[in-house]
Image (spheres, grey):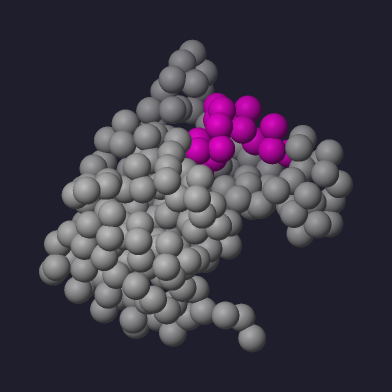
């Protein structure tokens, strides 16, 4: 029997914290094991409880979500961080991903997307809120595709799509090869072809694109 996912929740707004608590408690496979109302308290609770996932407000007092993620990356890399935020601009998302955040969820859509994000992150993937992922992919596409025609998902082969989907979820080339019953070299080739067609350069670009296509929606 698979163990439930253990979660620590941190937000400095009591109403928001209560709403998130109720949201998580409706899910039978998620266990809320600790709460905090500021960043330093969150760090203490996470150190004590060692959860699978920490869901934190990116703008908490004492220690914000970005700094908390950096601390956890060094101290407890097994704890994956999902941040909740009001910020929808690319700079915040880039900073979060660079610091090791695995999930980026807008507060306005937390009721619809938070549980989905947790489930994506707990199996090793990344999750970017579809609203901001779409905007970021548009910007990436404009930069990478100047002078080129627009590339749609229909331009990808089925194998390229399968490989990019699993790459977005954080699976290694070896994992993907085993899942699809193909060689690692083939995985590398499909990934390279797919990313070149779409003008994607980094892992974060792949995740953003996956979010815009709804590939992470039913995890």
What residue appears at the point 84 percent right and 39 percent down from the top-left corner? 185
Image quarter for residue 15? bottom left
Q: Is residue 145 above or below residue 183?
A: above
Q: Residue at x 61, y 33 (%)?
A: 195
**Residue 189 appears in view:** yes
Residue drawn at (36%, 65%), measured in percent from left and top?
45
In this rendering, position of residue 163 left or right of residue 209: right
Residue 125 position in % (x across, y down)? 55, 54
Left or right? Give the position of 17 relative to 123.
Answer: left
Q: Nearer the viewer, residue 100 or 47?
A: 47
Give the side of residue 185 with respect to residue 78, left or right: right
Picture coordinates of residue 123 (x, y %)? 58, 62
Q: Is residue 134 shown to the viewer in this render?
A: no
In magenta segment, residue 60:
no
Q: Residue furthest right?
A: 183
The residue positioned 35% from the left and 57% from the top of the image is 43
Q: Which region of the structure is painted magenta?
A: 190-208
Q: Between 4 and 125, which is closer to the camera in this rendering?
A: 4
Indicate whether residue 193 is drawn in magenta: yes
Q: Main secondary structure of the magenta part?
A: helix
Image quarter (top left, top right, bottom left or bottom right) of the N terminus: bottom right
């Amino acid at each position: 029997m698979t163990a439930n996912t253990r979660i620590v929740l941190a937000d400095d707004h009591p109403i928001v914290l209560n709403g998130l608590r109720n949201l998580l408690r409706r899910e039978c496979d998620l266990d809320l094991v600790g709460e905090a109302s500021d960043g330093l308290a969150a760090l203490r609770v996470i150190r004590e409880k060692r959860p699978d996932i920490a869901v934190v407000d990116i703008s908490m007092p004492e220690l914000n979500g970005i700094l908390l993620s950096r601390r956890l990356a060094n101290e407890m890399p097994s704890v994956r961080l999902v941040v909740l935020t009001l910020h929808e601009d690319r700079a915040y998302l880039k900073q979060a991903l660079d610091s090791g955040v695995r999930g980026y969820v807008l507060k306005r859509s937390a009721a619809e997307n938070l549980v989905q994000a947790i489930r994506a992150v707990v199996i090793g993937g990344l999750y970017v809120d579809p609203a901001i992922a779409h905007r970021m992919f548009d910007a990436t596409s404009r930069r990478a595709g100047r002078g080129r025609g627009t590339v749609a998902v229909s331009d990808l082969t089925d194998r390229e799509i399968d490989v990019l989907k699993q790459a977005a979820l954080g699976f290694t080339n070896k994992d993907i090869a085993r899942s699809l019953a193909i060689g690692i070299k083939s995985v590398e080739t499909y990934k390279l072809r797919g990313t070149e067609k779409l003008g994607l350069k980094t892992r974060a670009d792949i995740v953003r694109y996956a979010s815009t296509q709804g590939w992470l929606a039913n995890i």
